[in-house]
Amino acid sequence: MDRDFLAFLAAFVVVVALFAIGIRFLLPMIAQHLKGAAGGWGRFSRVYATTRRPPAPIFRRQSLVVGQILYRNCVNVGSDGLGLYLELAFPMTILRRRPLFVPWMEFQRVDAGRLFWRKAALISLGDPLVGTMTAPMDLFNAAIRPAIGTVLTPLADDGIYPILFIRGRF
């Protein structure tokens, strides 16, 4: 055999071995992240899982932060007089996460936030706190704000109005 071929073969075997070792350690971390182990969709689904049909209109392929997990362009959002409906869209449907339905009574506080360097609403859910969700301001204004009322308190620096709730009252 040619010496160059043997060097190429040895380099190939080393690269394949390093790739296999990397996959062995990287895949579990990616799977744990997608499952929402840090308080994402999995934590919310223990409290807010639903079998309800989504209300119309539905805002498709929205970006949200649920807990500490960013779901970019893969969440369908709908709202009605009873609450907020969230479901994962493709490609996240392969995770088999149940849709969520959050009643308006669970919204405890809405504060100013940022998502992709744009204004967003940081929403605290549950009493005691189940978790937080961050929604872009355009989605918040279209799907959430009309349903939760207009009890607004101005926030000093950038004109976003957080909504403060008392449990059971809007």
Image (cartoon, rainbow, N blue to C red):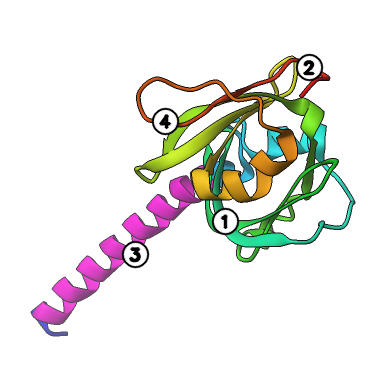
Cα–Cα gap, marks 2 and 3? 57 Å
Per the rendering, the mark at residue 71 is none
Say what amino acid the circle numbered 3 marks: Val
Say what amino acid the circle numbered 1 marks: Gln
Residue shown at the point (58%, 33%) measured from the top left:
67
> Are the residues tagged 1 and 2 within 8 Å (C-beta)?
no
Q: Position of residue 137 (x, y in %)?
A: 51, 44
> Are the residues tagged 2 and 4 within 8 Å (C-beta)?
no
> In front: 107, or 65?
107
Residue shown at the point (69%, 43%) measured from the top left:
146
Residue shown at the point (62%, 50%) measured from the top left:
142
Badge 2: how crowded within 10 Å, few (<14), some, or many (20+)?
some
Say what amino acid the circle numbered 2 marks: Arg
Residue at the spot of label 1: 62
The region drawn magenta spans: 4-29
> In front: 107, or 157?
157
Per the rendering, the mark at residue 167 is 2
Image depth: mark 4 or mark 3 in front: 4
Task: Please give left or right for residue 165 compared with residue 3 in the image.
Answer: right
> In front: 61, or 108?
108
Image depth: mark 4 or mark 1 in front: 4
| Residue 4 to residue 152: above or below | below
Badge 1: how crowded within 10 Å, few (<14), some, or many (20+)?
some
Residue at the spot of label 3: 16
| Element type at mark 1 | strand
Q: Position of residue 11 (x, y in %)?
A: 21, 67
Q: Position of residue 153 (x, y in %)?
A: 55, 20
Residue shown at the point (60%, 65%) measured from the top left:
91
Mark 4 or 1, nearer chain start: 1
